[in-house]
Image: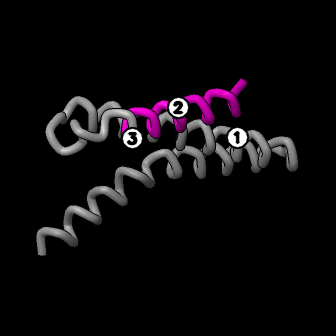
Amino acid sequence: ALAAMVLATFLIALALRYGLLRYWGDSAWLLGAIALALWAAWIGVIALVVQALRRADPRPAMRRWSGVLGAVGTTVPWFGLVLANLMRST
């Protein structure tokens, strides 16, 4: 079910991006919806990785570290956007 959610949100983002191409630069709502769909797909991928790590090593230490890695991994796209904006402004 999680893999299907990842695929669905990614396909929704692609459909919004290329299906509504003429509105791409004009609509902040469209850009927000695409970013939200891509972020949801990224969260799903992180959840799949965390599940795989926990199944590979069921010890409590792996549960803790996989949770930490998952929490950090969910914010990576936002840090990338901030860094890109910072580099563009200089």
- In the drawing, does residue 60 fall left or right of residue 18? right
Quote the CA–CA distance across marks 1 and 2: 15 Å
- Secondary structure under tag 2 reads helix
Element carrying mark 3? helix
Asked if 54 appears above or below 2 in the picture, the reply is below
Q: Mark 1, mark 2: which one is toward the viewer?
A: 2
**Mark nearer the N terminus (3 vs 2):** 2
87 lies left or right of 36:
left
Front residue of this view, candidates 73 and 80:
80
- Which of the 4 image quadrants contains residue 46? top right
Q: Secondary structure at mark 1?
A: helix
Looking at the rendered structure, the kind of residue marked 3 is Tyr
Rendering coords of residue 56 (x, y %): 87, 48
Q: Which mark is residue 18?
A: 3
Between the C-alphas of marks 3 and 2, the distance is 14 Å
At label 2, which amino acid type do we have? Thr
What residue sits 54% from the left and 35% below the top?
11
Q: Nearer the viewer, mark 3 or mark 1?
A: 3
Disc 1 marks which residue?
48
Does residue 8 belong to the magenta stretch?
Answer: yes
Crowd rating for badge 1 (residues with CA inside 10 Å; few <14, some 14–19, many 20+):
some
Write the residue at 27% across / 38% down. 31
Give, as a single range, the part of the protein colored magenta: 1-18
In which image quadrant can residue 5 be found?
top right
Left or right of 61? Residue 15 is: left
Separation (CA) of disc 3 from disc 1: 27 Å
Q: Residue furthest bottom?
A: 90
Q: Which residue bears the numbered disc 2? A: 9
- Residue 64 is inside the magenta segment: no
Question: Which mark sits nearer the N-terminus, 1 or 2?
Answer: 2
Please say if 31 is above or below 80. Answer: above
Color encoding of the figure? one colour
